[in-house]
């Protein structure tokens, strides 16, 4: 039988270890009956994880956890979830603060704690995730969002083949939660203002707060909606703001209803990716007229992948099989000729030259003359994206 009252959980993530740990300490001091759980993944590639449980007075327990498979998901499944269920059954704490390892994204933890089942019942009968929080250091935020380092370059890789970049991990940590804690910068108001602008434009859904124990404690008591958070980040559906500007921090969304020429886009990639800290969205390539493509760039790295067909490429009867949010987005994007095929790419940067960026992207679109031949087959030799997109299809 489930507990009479589900145990309360807050997930705290962040690449910047000192800032994150400080915020967790503030949680513990702000709520004396809180307990923090942290998995040190330094040795995860060797199958070794150290789990630390502590409260405001210090460590209560430290144990080595041996894993059969060296990955974050098995750590969550095989140790964190059972541990929280055990602690919750004992009922000793008012709040359980799950402190993520540096390179772990909060989404992985939240979904493990909200989408699992216990004895064929929803885990929500036992655990309630009240908040998901990412903590960032004001002194490091912009530098890490523009970094070309891989996680392994800093010893932060969490799998045998962890090829993520520092900028990619930090961007995803920032964009998922509904609360962001900005640590440091108190003596530099201009830095705080700039960091706040960057965070608010990367994640307009999040409250941005200082690491004050009272404000952190106030985050507990709600309920984090993991389904809504995932939908908010779905590149096939997102409808970003067209333009936002605070000081030198700008976000511009490029929307068009004609396809991109693969050769010209490929030639312009370095300039396009380098224009901002972060860019993301969906795009339409002339060589793949029926395929919705996802654009995900952080720092100096760009990932592209296929995300199924445009709805305009499907028979009407198939629309009923598509999630409602995707149908709504398609209707918002709908063009009399192109259907939901479109360019919807959002760029955020400091000192971003929006006019130059839009001009560059527009130059990559098919011309009127090329549009008349758009239905032709594009040989792989004329599509520089064929190798990478076919590999991930």
Image (cartoon, helix red, strand yellow):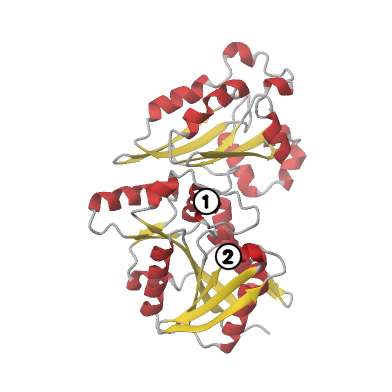
Instruction: Please give the name of the residue rendered at 56% of the width and 83% of the height, measured from the top-left corner.
Output: 5
Q: Is residue 357 visible?
A: yes
Q: Quadrant of the N terminus?
A: bottom right
Is tag 2's residue or tag 1's residue first in the polypeptide sequence? Answer: 2
- Image x and y of residue 370, in percent: 62, 14
- Image x and y of residue 220, in percent: 44, 72
* Residue 23 figure quarter: bottom left
Label 1's element? helix
133 sits left or right of 320 in the view: left
> Can you identify the residue that label 1 sits on?
153
> Can you identify the residue that label 2 sits on?
109
* Residue 128 figure quarter: bottom right
- Name above or below for residue 41 compared with residue 378: below
Instruction: Please give the name of the residue rendered at 22% of the width and 57% of the height, measured from the top-left corner.
Output: 187
Q: Residues within 10 Å of mark 1 (few under 14, many from 20)?
A: few
Q: Nearer the viewer, mark 2 or mark 1?
A: 1
Q: Is residue 290 visible?
A: no
The reply to whether callout 2 and callout 1 are in contact (CB within 8 Å) is no
- Name above or below for residue 140 compared with residue 102: above
Instruction: Please give the name of the residue rendered at 59% of the width and 24% of the height, measured from the top-left corner.
Output: 260
Label 2's element? helix
- Image x and y of residue 331, in percent: 60, 38
* Residue 377 figure quarter: top right
Total labels: the figure holds: 2
């Amino acid at each position: 039988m489930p507990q009479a009252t589900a145990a309360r959980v807050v997930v705290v993530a962040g690449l910047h270890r000192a800032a994150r740990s400080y915020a967790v300490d503030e949680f513990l001091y702000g709520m004396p009956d809180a307990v923090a759980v942290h998995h040190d993944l330094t040795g995860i590639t060797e199958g070794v994880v150290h789990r630390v449980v502590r409260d405001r007075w210090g460590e209560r327990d430290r144990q080595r956890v041996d894993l059969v498979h060296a990955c974050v998901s098995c750590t969550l499944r095989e140790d964190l979830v059972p541990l929280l269920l055990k602690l919750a059954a004992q009922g000793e704490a008012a709040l359980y603060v799950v402190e993520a390892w540096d390179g772990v994204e909060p989404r992985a933890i939240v979904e493990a704690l909200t989408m699992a089942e216990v004895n064929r019942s929803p885990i929500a009968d036992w655990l309630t995730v009240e908040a998901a929080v990412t903590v960032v250091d004001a002194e490091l935020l912009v530098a890490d969002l523009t970094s070309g380092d891989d996680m392994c370059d800093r010893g932060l890789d969490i799998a045998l083949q962890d090829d993520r970049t520092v900028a990619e991990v930090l961007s995803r940590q920032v964009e998922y939660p509904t609360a962001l804690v900005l640590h440091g910068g108190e003596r530099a108001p201009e830095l705080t203002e700039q960091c706040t602008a960057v965070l608010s434009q990367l994640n307009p859904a999040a409250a941005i707060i200082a690491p004050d124990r009272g404000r952190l404690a106030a985050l507990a008591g709600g309920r984090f909606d993991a389904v809504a958070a995932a939908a908010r980040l779905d590149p096939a559906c997102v409808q970003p703001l067209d333009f936002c500007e605070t000081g030198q921090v700008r976000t511009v969304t490029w929307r068009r209803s004609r396809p991109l020429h693969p050769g010209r886009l490929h030639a312009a990639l370095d300039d396009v990716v380098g224009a901002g800290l972060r860019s993301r969205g969906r795009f339409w390539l002339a060589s793949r007229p029926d395929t919705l493509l996802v654009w995900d760039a952080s720092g100096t790295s760009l990932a592209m992948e296929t995300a199924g067909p445009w709805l305009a490429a499907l028979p009407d009867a198939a629309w009923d099989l598509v999630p409602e949010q995707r149908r709504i987005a398609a209707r918002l994007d709908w063009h009399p000729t192109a259907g939901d095929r479109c360019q919807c790419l959002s760029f955020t940067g400091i000192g971003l030259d929006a006019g130059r960026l839009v001009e560059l992207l527009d130059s990559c679109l098919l011309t009127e003359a090329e549009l008349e031949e758009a239905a032709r087959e594009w040989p792989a030799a004329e599509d520089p994206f064929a190798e990478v997109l076919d590999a991930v299809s």
